[in-house]
Amino acid sequence: MAKSSGSSKRDGDTLRKLPSGLEIVRRKKHEPIDFLSLDAADRKKLTGKIFGSKFASTWDLDRVTNFIAQHVASNGWDSGTGPASMDVLVSEIAGYANGKIVHAIRIVSDGRYVHAYPVEDRT
Amino acid sequence: MKKARPLPLEDEAHLVEPPIVDFLHHHPARRAYVVTFVPEDSVSHAETEVVEIPDASGDGLRIKLQLDKLARLLNSRTRIERLTHSGGGNFEIRFEGGKTKSLSTSPSPDATFGVYSSLQDIAMTAQIAFIAQHRTPASVVA
């Protein structure tokens, strides 16, 4: 499997500067882990609020970065937008949040830096 | 004299509890600290919330004070530019000029009580500012 282009970046570093002026940053706490080696209690702990929800292994850094860039552009976010967030439902497993398999991704902008993480499905 | 009890550094969950600073930077154009934080469940069930704190406000000055203290505790002569939560008790701290420091709860001389109490203070300041900014005004009965 090819290495993601941002894998040498440190946590919190900018992965991509968008034409809108916003910057996508790396957030290691949401990157995939070996879920199968964990029991239910550890899976819940390691994908909860303190350790952060985690993407499934199908969502590597390049894919997450492209996903964020696409949705930021289609929603017209730019550096003047201010803090904003959006939830995007995907047609596959996005990852784990609070120990549960989830299918939604939250994209969060603080007005300058943008990142994304899996969130629990809305029922 | 009683022997001091060591900090439970081996258990990250004991060291950090929400509110936790998730991502922090200073926005020069907005003249504000922008703090993404992991809120306590009693404040928000969201994994993170974002709050902007004007740097000249009381809360802004408090955050500056804590960031300066953190830089000193981490032996840096330059100011903190970006602070990133890496999960559990782990943080990545980037200083002006590009130097970085990873703060880990695994036994490390950097994982001192002072460092974590500064981080906790910043997170609490952000959470209180968030609550104040989102409070619904009480209705006035004439």
Image: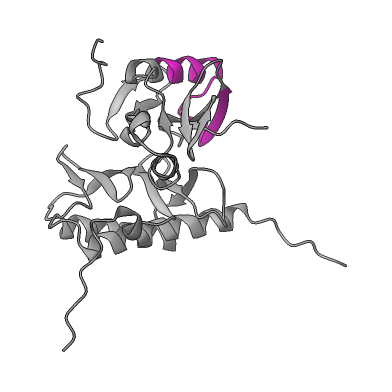
Q: Residue at x 27, y 46 (%)?
A: B91
Rendering coords of residue A8 (x, y %): 19, 24
Residue A71 horizontal side relative to residue B86, left or right = right
Residue at the extreme top = A2
Q: Is residue B56 above or below residue A66?
A: below
**Residue A98 part of the magenta segment:** no
Q: Residue at x 19, y 55 (%)?
A: B71
Q: Residue at x 36, y 45 (%)?
A: B24
Q: Which residues are magenta?
A: A66-88
Quarter of the rendering occupied by the C terminus of chain A? top right
Rendering coords of residue A73 (x, y %): 50, 16
Question: Is residue B100 in sight in this rendering?
Answer: yes
The answer to which of B70 and A123 lies nearer the viewer is: A123
Residue at the extreme bottom = B1
Q: Name the image quarter holding residue A66.
A: top left
The answer to which of A95 and B93 lies nearer the viewer is: A95
Q: How is the image coloured?
A: one colour
Question: Is residue B56 in sight in this rendering?
Answer: no
The mark tally for this picture is 0
Q: Is residue A90 above or below residue A29?
A: above
Q: Is residue B30 above or below residue B74?
A: above
Rendering coords of residue B69 (x, y %): 23, 61
Residue B52 horizontal side relative to residue B107, left or right = right
Q: Residue at x 29, y 27 (%)?
A: A14
Residue B119 horizontal side relative to residue B111, left or right = right
Quarter of the rendering occupied by the N terminus of chain A? top left
**Residue A70 part of the magenta segment:** yes
Rendering coords of residue A47 (x, y %): 42, 39
